[in-house]
Image (cartoon, grey):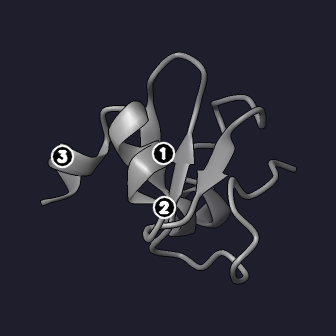
Amino acid sequence: MAEPSTRTRTPNAEDIASWPDDTWARLGEVRRGDFDWKSDDYEVVLLEDTLRLRELAILDELH
């Protein structure tokens, strides 16, 4: 399973799963099985980790 990018809290369903191919989804969607066709090499990014979300070009898509 993927490791969180920061260790400030336990990831929840609203956090982000980011794959190396630039695909991303809410962690809840991944846990629900909506992305079980994808590999499990995703990175978990907490919503408050805005620096990492910006680096991954995800932050602007969330707003």
Q: Which residue is mark 1?
A: 52
Q: How many residues crowd around disc 2 within 10 Å: few (fewer than 14), some, or many (20 or more)?
A: some
State left or right for residue 47 relative to residue 32: left
Q: Looking at this view, is 57 or 36 the one in front?
A: 57
Q: Quadrant of the C terminus?
A: bottom left
Q: Residue at x 17, y 46 (%)?
A: 60
Position above or below: 30 against 54: below
Count of picture labels: 3
Position above or below: 61 against 8: above
What is the distance, in whole Å, between disc 2 and disc 3 at their CAs?
Answer: 15 Å
State left or right for residue 63 relative to residue 15: left
Q: What is the three-letter code of the residue carrying label 2?
A: Asp
Q: What is the three-letter code of the residue carrying label 1?
A: Arg
Q: Which mark is residue 49?
A: 2
Specify the farthest residue to the right.
Answer: 1
Of the image marks 2 and 3, the number of the one nearer the N terminus = 2
Position above or below: 51 against 20: below
Q: How many residues crowd around disc 3 within 10 Å: few (fewer than 14), some, or many (20 or more)?
A: few
Q: Which residue is mark 3?
A: 61
Q: Looking at this view, is 30 or 17 the one in front?
A: 17
Look at the numbered disc 2 and give the secondary structure of its residue. loop
Q: How many residues crowd around disc 1 within 10 Å: few (fewer than 14), some, or many (20 or more)?
A: some
Residue 50 x, y percent position in the rendering? 38, 57
Q: Residue at x 41, y 33 (%)?
A: 55
Q: Looking at this view, is 28 or 11 the one in front?
A: 11
Q: Residue at x 44, y 29 (%)?
A: 23
Look at the numbered disc 3 and give the secondary structure of its residue. helix
Of the image marks 3 and 1, the number of the one nearer the N terminus = 1
Q: Are marks 2 and 3 in contact (CB under 8 Å)?
A: no
